[in-house]
Image (cartoon, coloured by chain):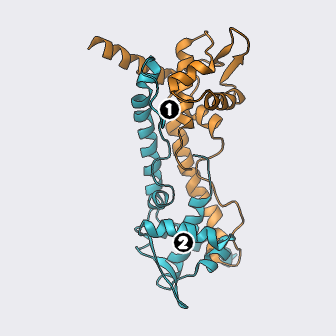
Chain colours: A orange, B cyan
Amino acid sequence: MPANSRFAVAVHILALMAQSEDEPIKSDKMASSVNTNPVVIRRIMCALAGAKLVTSQTGANGGSKLAQKPGQITLLDVYHAIEGGSIFALHRQSPSRHCIVGSHIKPVLGSVLEEVNLEIERALAKTTIEQVLHIIQARARGQKRN
Amino acid sequence: MPANSRFAVAVHILALMAQSEDEPIKSDKMASSVNTNPVVIRRIMCALAGAKLVTSQTGANGGSKLAQKPGQITLLDVYHAIEGGSIFALHRQSPSRHCIVGSHIKPVLGSVLEEVNLEIERALAKTTIEQVLHIIQARARGQKRN
Protein backbone atom coordinates (compact mmCIF):
# COMPACT_ATOMS: atom_id res chain seq x y z
CA MET A 1 0.00 0.00 0.00
CA PRO A 2 2.89 2.49 0.37
CA ALA A 3 2.81 5.02 -2.44
CA ASN A 4 5.21 4.28 -5.27
CA SER A 5 5.62 5.92 -8.63
CA ARG A 6 5.24 2.90 -10.95
CA PHE A 7 1.65 3.89 -11.64
CA ALA A 8 2.64 7.49 -12.51
CA VAL A 9 5.42 6.25 -14.80
CA ALA A 10 3.00 3.85 -16.52
CA VAL A 11 0.55 6.69 -17.22
CA HIS A 12 3.46 8.81 -18.50
CA ILE A 13 4.62 6.22 -21.06
CA LEU A 14 1.06 5.41 -22.15
CA ALA A 15 0.55 9.15 -22.80
CA LEU A 16 3.77 9.13 -24.88
CA MET A 17 2.47 6.21 -26.95
CA ALA A 18 -0.94 7.89 -27.32
CA GLN A 19 0.85 11.00 -28.60
CA SER A 20 2.94 9.07 -31.11
CA GLU A 21 -0.15 7.18 -32.38
CA ASP A 22 0.85 4.40 -34.82
CA GLU A 23 4.56 5.17 -34.66
CA PRO A 24 6.26 2.69 -32.27
CA ILE A 25 8.48 4.22 -29.55
CA LYS A 26 11.63 2.59 -28.19
CA SER A 27 11.98 2.10 -24.44
CA ASP A 28 15.18 4.23 -24.44
CA LYS A 29 13.21 7.21 -25.71
CA MET A 30 10.50 6.65 -23.09
CA ALA A 31 13.18 6.33 -20.39
CA SER A 32 14.67 9.64 -21.47
CA SER A 33 11.26 11.39 -21.27
CA VAL A 34 10.54 9.87 -17.83
CA ASN A 35 14.18 10.45 -16.80
CA THR A 36 14.71 6.93 -15.52
CA ASN A 37 16.58 3.75 -16.39
CA PRO A 38 15.32 1.82 -19.48
CA VAL A 39 15.14 -1.30 -17.27
CA VAL A 40 12.42 0.38 -15.18
CA ILE A 41 10.50 1.18 -18.37
CA ARG A 42 10.87 -2.34 -19.74
CA ARG A 43 9.55 -3.83 -16.50
CA ILE A 44 6.49 -1.58 -16.60
CA MET A 45 6.01 -2.27 -20.35
CA CYS A 46 6.01 -5.97 -19.52
CA ALA A 47 3.09 -5.48 -17.11
CA LEU A 48 1.24 -3.28 -19.63
CA ALA A 49 1.77 -5.86 -22.40
CA GLY A 50 0.49 -8.60 -20.07
CA ALA A 51 -2.72 -6.60 -19.67
CA LYS A 52 -2.92 -6.18 -23.48
CA LEU A 53 -2.67 -2.38 -23.24
CA VAL A 54 0.46 -2.20 -25.44
CA THR A 55 2.18 -4.26 -28.13
CA SER A 56 5.88 -4.34 -28.92
CA GLN A 57 7.88 -5.32 -31.97
CA THR A 58 11.60 -6.00 -32.01
CA GLY A 59 14.15 -5.05 -34.67
CA ALA A 60 15.70 -1.83 -36.00
CA ASN A 61 12.32 -0.18 -36.51
CA GLY A 62 10.89 -1.82 -33.43
CA GLY A 63 9.32 -0.24 -30.39
CA SER A 64 6.01 -0.22 -28.58
CA LYS A 65 2.62 1.28 -29.23
CA LEU A 66 -0.86 1.19 -27.71
CA ALA A 67 -2.86 -1.97 -28.35
CA GLN A 68 -6.13 -0.10 -27.71
CA LYS A 69 -7.44 3.38 -28.49
CA PRO A 70 -6.24 5.87 -25.81
CA GLY A 71 -9.88 6.77 -25.12
CA GLN A 72 -10.51 3.14 -24.14
CA ILE A 73 -7.67 2.87 -21.60
CA THR A 74 -8.73 4.19 -18.19
CA LEU A 75 -6.45 4.83 -15.22
CA LEU A 76 -8.19 1.86 -13.61
CA ASP A 77 -6.93 -0.40 -16.43
CA VAL A 78 -3.44 0.98 -15.80
CA TYR A 79 -3.77 0.40 -12.08
CA HIS A 80 -4.90 -3.21 -12.55
CA ALA A 81 -2.08 -3.84 -15.04
CA ILE A 82 0.60 -2.40 -12.76
CA GLU A 83 -0.49 -3.33 -9.28
CA GLY A 84 -3.12 -6.03 -9.70
CA GLY A 85 -5.66 -6.85 -7.00
CA SER A 86 -7.25 -4.47 -4.53
CA ILE A 87 -5.54 -1.59 -2.77
CA PHE A 88 -6.73 -2.58 0.68
CA ALA A 89 -6.31 -6.24 1.57
CA LEU A 90 -7.49 -8.33 4.49
CA HIS A 91 -5.31 -10.40 6.85
CA ARG A 92 -3.30 -13.08 5.06
CA GLN A 93 -3.73 -15.47 8.01
CA SER A 94 -6.98 -16.61 9.68
CA PRO A 95 -7.50 -14.77 12.98
CA SER A 96 -8.31 -16.71 16.16
CA ARG A 97 -11.85 -18.09 16.39
CA HIS A 98 -11.64 -18.03 20.22
CA CYS A 99 -12.18 -14.28 20.40
CA ILE A 100 -15.16 -12.20 19.26
CA VAL A 101 -13.04 -9.69 17.33
CA GLY A 102 -10.90 -12.45 15.75
CA SER A 103 -13.98 -14.43 14.70
CA HIS A 104 -15.73 -11.57 12.94
CA ILE A 105 -13.12 -9.02 11.85
CA LYS A 106 -12.58 -10.46 8.37
CA PRO A 107 -16.17 -10.29 7.05
CA VAL A 108 -16.79 -6.94 8.81
CA LEU A 109 -13.61 -5.25 7.59
CA GLY A 110 -14.04 -7.02 4.24
CA SER A 111 -17.32 -5.26 3.51
CA VAL A 112 -15.95 -1.88 4.67
CA LEU A 113 -12.84 -2.25 2.48
CA GLU A 114 -14.85 -3.50 -0.47
CA GLU A 115 -16.67 -0.19 -0.45
CA VAL A 116 -13.40 1.77 -0.21
CA ASN A 117 -11.90 -0.27 -3.08
CA LEU A 118 -15.03 0.42 -5.16
CA GLU A 119 -14.70 4.19 -4.53
CA ILE A 120 -11.09 4.05 -5.70
CA GLU A 121 -12.02 2.06 -8.80
CA ARG A 122 -14.83 4.48 -9.64
CA ALA A 123 -12.43 7.45 -9.27
CA LEU A 124 -9.73 5.84 -11.45
CA ALA A 125 -12.20 4.67 -14.11
CA LYS A 126 -13.31 8.27 -14.75
CA THR A 127 -10.12 9.31 -16.58
CA THR A 128 -8.66 7.88 -19.80
CA ILE A 129 -5.15 8.14 -21.27
CA GLU A 130 -6.67 10.21 -24.09
CA GLN A 131 -7.99 12.74 -21.55
CA VAL A 132 -4.59 12.91 -19.81
CA LEU A 133 -2.91 13.56 -23.19
CA HIS A 134 -5.51 16.19 -24.14
CA ILE A 135 -4.97 18.12 -20.87
CA ILE A 136 -1.19 17.94 -21.42
CA GLN A 137 -1.55 19.22 -25.00
CA ALA A 138 -3.89 22.03 -23.90
CA ARG A 139 -1.36 23.12 -21.24
CA ALA A 140 1.46 23.02 -23.81
CA ARG A 141 -0.58 25.17 -26.25
CA GLY A 142 -1.40 27.62 -23.43
CA GLN A 143 2.29 27.93 -22.55
CA LYS A 144 3.27 28.53 -26.19
CA ARG A 145 0.74 31.36 -26.45
CA ASN A 146 2.14 33.16 -23.38
CA MET B 1 0.73 0.60 -3.58
CA PRO B 2 0.51 -3.22 -3.59
CA ALA B 3 -2.10 -4.40 -1.13
CA ASN B 4 -0.72 -5.56 2.20
CA SER B 5 -2.46 -6.56 5.38
CA ARG B 6 -0.79 -4.19 7.88
CA PHE B 7 -3.81 -1.91 7.70
CA ALA B 8 -6.27 -4.78 8.37
CA VAL B 9 -4.14 -6.00 11.30
CA ALA B 10 -4.02 -2.45 12.73
CA VAL B 11 -7.84 -2.17 12.60
CA HIS B 12 -8.08 -5.62 14.23
CA ILE B 13 -5.90 -4.69 17.22
CA LEU B 14 -7.56 -1.28 17.63
CA ALA B 15 -10.94 -3.08 17.77
CA LEU B 16 -9.49 -5.39 20.46
CA MET B 17 -8.39 -2.37 22.50
CA ALA B 18 -11.77 -0.68 21.97
CA GLN B 19 -13.45 -3.84 23.26
CA SER B 20 -11.24 -4.05 26.34
CA GLU B 21 -11.81 -0.33 27.14
CA ASP B 22 -9.56 0.84 30.00
CA GLU B 23 -7.97 -2.58 30.54
CA PRO B 24 -4.52 -2.63 28.84
CA ILE B 25 -3.88 -5.61 26.49
CA LYS B 26 -0.48 -7.25 26.01
CA SER B 27 0.90 -7.62 22.47
CA ASP B 28 1.08 -11.43 22.93
CA LYS B 29 -2.68 -11.54 23.44
CA MET B 30 -3.26 -9.36 20.38
CA ALA B 31 -0.88 -11.56 18.35
CA SER B 32 -2.85 -14.63 19.36
CA SER B 33 -6.17 -13.03 18.28
CA VAL B 34 -4.67 -11.90 14.95
CA ASN B 35 -2.79 -15.21 14.64
CA THR B 36 0.56 -13.63 13.88
CA ASN B 37 3.97 -13.07 15.45
CA PRO B 38 4.11 -10.59 18.40
CA VAL B 39 6.92 -8.78 16.54
CA VAL B 40 4.45 -7.86 13.76
CA ILE B 41 2.04 -6.51 16.38
CA ARG B 42 4.74 -4.52 18.18
CA ARG B 43 5.82 -2.89 14.90
CA ILE B 44 2.25 -1.86 14.11
CA MET B 45 1.73 -0.69 17.73
CA CYS B 46 4.81 1.49 17.32
CA ALA B 47 3.23 3.23 14.30
CA LEU B 48 -0.10 3.61 16.14
CA ALA B 49 1.66 5.05 19.21
CA GLY B 50 3.55 7.50 16.97
CA ALA B 51 0.19 8.75 15.68
CA LYS B 52 -1.04 9.05 19.29
CA LEU B 53 -3.84 6.51 18.72
CA VAL B 54 -2.63 4.18 21.51
CA THR B 55 -0.57 4.36 24.68
CA SER B 56 1.48 1.58 26.24
CA GLN B 57 2.77 0.91 29.71
CA THR B 58 5.46 -1.60 30.63
CA GLY B 59 5.62 -3.91 33.67
CA ALA B 60 3.73 -6.95 34.92
CA ASN B 61 0.35 -5.24 34.55
CA GLY B 62 1.47 -3.44 31.39
CA GLY B 63 -0.04 -3.47 27.95
CA SER B 64 -1.62 -1.07 25.50
CA LYS B 65 -4.90 0.76 25.27
CA LEU B 66 -6.53 3.39 23.07
CA ALA B 67 -5.35 6.95 23.60
CA GLN B 68 -8.58 8.32 22.10
CA LYS B 69 -12.23 7.31 22.21
CA PRO B 70 -12.93 4.58 19.61
CA GLY B 71 -15.63 6.83 18.08
CA GLN B 72 -12.92 9.43 17.36
CA ILE B 73 -10.54 7.08 15.53
CA THR B 74 -11.45 6.76 11.85
CA LEU B 75 -10.03 4.27 9.37
CA LEU B 76 -8.35 7.28 7.74
CA ASP B 77 -6.43 7.95 10.99
CA VAL B 78 -5.37 4.30 10.98
CA TYR B 79 -4.31 4.51 7.34
CA HIS B 80 -2.22 7.65 7.96
CA ALA B 81 -0.61 6.09 11.03
CA ILE B 82 0.29 2.87 9.24
CA GLU B 83 1.12 3.92 5.71
CA GLY B 84 1.63 7.70 5.87
CA GLY B 85 1.41 9.90 2.77
CA SER B 86 -0.87 9.44 -0.19
CA ILE B 87 -1.80 6.17 -1.86
CA PHE B 88 -0.96 7.33 -5.36
CA ALA B 89 2.35 9.14 -5.76
CA LEU B 90 3.91 11.02 -8.63
CA HIS B 91 7.31 10.33 -10.24
CA ARG B 92 10.20 10.57 -7.83
CA GLN B 93 12.45 12.06 -10.52
CA SER B 94 11.81 15.12 -12.72
CA PRO B 95 10.75 14.05 -16.24
CA SER B 96 12.47 15.55 -19.30
CA ARG B 97 11.56 19.13 -20.12
CA HIS B 98 12.43 18.53 -23.79
CA CYS B 99 9.20 16.67 -24.48
CA ILE B 100 5.59 17.86 -24.20
CA VAL B 101 4.46 14.86 -22.13
CA GLY B 102 7.53 15.04 -19.87
CA SER B 103 7.08 18.78 -19.29
CA HIS B 104 3.44 18.59 -18.24
CA ILE B 105 2.73 15.09 -16.90
CA LYS B 106 3.45 15.93 -13.24
CA PRO B 107 0.95 18.79 -12.74
CA VAL B 108 -1.68 17.05 -14.92
CA LEU B 109 -1.41 13.65 -13.24
CA GLY B 110 -0.97 15.43 -9.90
CA SER B 111 -4.42 17.00 -10.07
CA VAL B 112 -6.04 13.73 -11.25
CA LEU B 113 -4.41 11.74 -8.43
CA GLU B 114 -5.20 14.41 -5.84
CA GLU B 115 -8.86 13.82 -6.60
CA VAL B 116 -8.46 10.03 -6.34
CA ASN B 117 -6.61 10.39 -3.04
CA LEU B 118 -9.40 12.65 -1.73
CA GLU B 119 -12.04 10.04 -2.67
CA ILE B 120 -10.09 7.40 -0.76
CA GLU B 121 -9.71 9.66 2.26
CA ARG B 122 -13.43 10.49 2.23
CA ALA B 123 -14.29 6.77 2.06
CA LEU B 124 -11.93 5.84 4.93
CA ALA B 125 -12.99 8.77 7.11
CA LYS B 126 -16.60 7.53 7.11
CA THR B 127 -15.97 4.57 9.45
CA THR B 128 -14.67 4.64 13.05
CA ILE B 129 -13.14 1.86 15.16
CA GLU B 130 -16.24 2.10 17.38
CA GLN B 131 -18.46 1.33 14.38
CA VAL B 132 -16.26 -1.64 13.38
CA LEU B 133 -16.51 -3.01 16.94
CA HIS B 134 -20.29 -2.46 17.05
CA ILE B 135 -20.79 -4.38 13.79
CA ILE B 136 -18.58 -7.20 15.13
CA GLN B 137 -20.55 -7.33 18.40
CA ALA B 138 -23.89 -7.31 16.54
CA ARG B 139 -22.71 -10.24 14.37
CA ALA B 140 -21.54 -12.13 17.47
CA ARG B 141 -24.92 -11.59 19.19
CA GLY B 142 -26.72 -12.71 16.02
CA GLN B 143 -24.65 -15.91 15.89
CA LYS B 144 -25.33 -16.66 19.55
CA ARG B 145 -29.06 -16.35 18.99
CA ASN B 146 -29.02 -18.83 16.08
Residue plotted at (64% across, 30% down): A39
Residue plotted at (66% across, 32% down): A43
The one nearer the camera, A138 or A76, is: A138
x and y percent of residue B96 in the render? 46, 23
Please give the chain letter of the residue carrying mark 1: A
Specify few, some or many for label 1: CA neighbours under 10 Å numbering under 14, 14-19, or 20 or more: few
The one nearer the camera, B45 or A94, is: B45
Numbered marks: total: 2
Give SS at disc 2. Answer: helix
CB-based contact (under 8 Å), mark 2 and mark 1: no
| The residue positioned farthest toward the bottom in the image shown | B60
Q: Amino acid at mark 2?
A: Ala
The one nearer the camera, A143 or A86, is: A143
Q: Quadrant of residue A141?
A: top left
Residue plotted at (63% across, 12% down): A24
Q: Quadrant of residue A23?
A: top right
Whole-angstrom CA distance, mark 2 to mark 1, is 35 Å
Query: For the C terminus of chain A, which image quadrant?
Result: top left
Tag shown at residue A17: none
Q: Amino acid at mark 1?
A: Lys
The correct choice, above or below, for B27 with respect to B109 in the image is below
* Residue that numbered label 1 is attached to: A126
Q: Are marks 2 and 1 on the same chain?
A: no
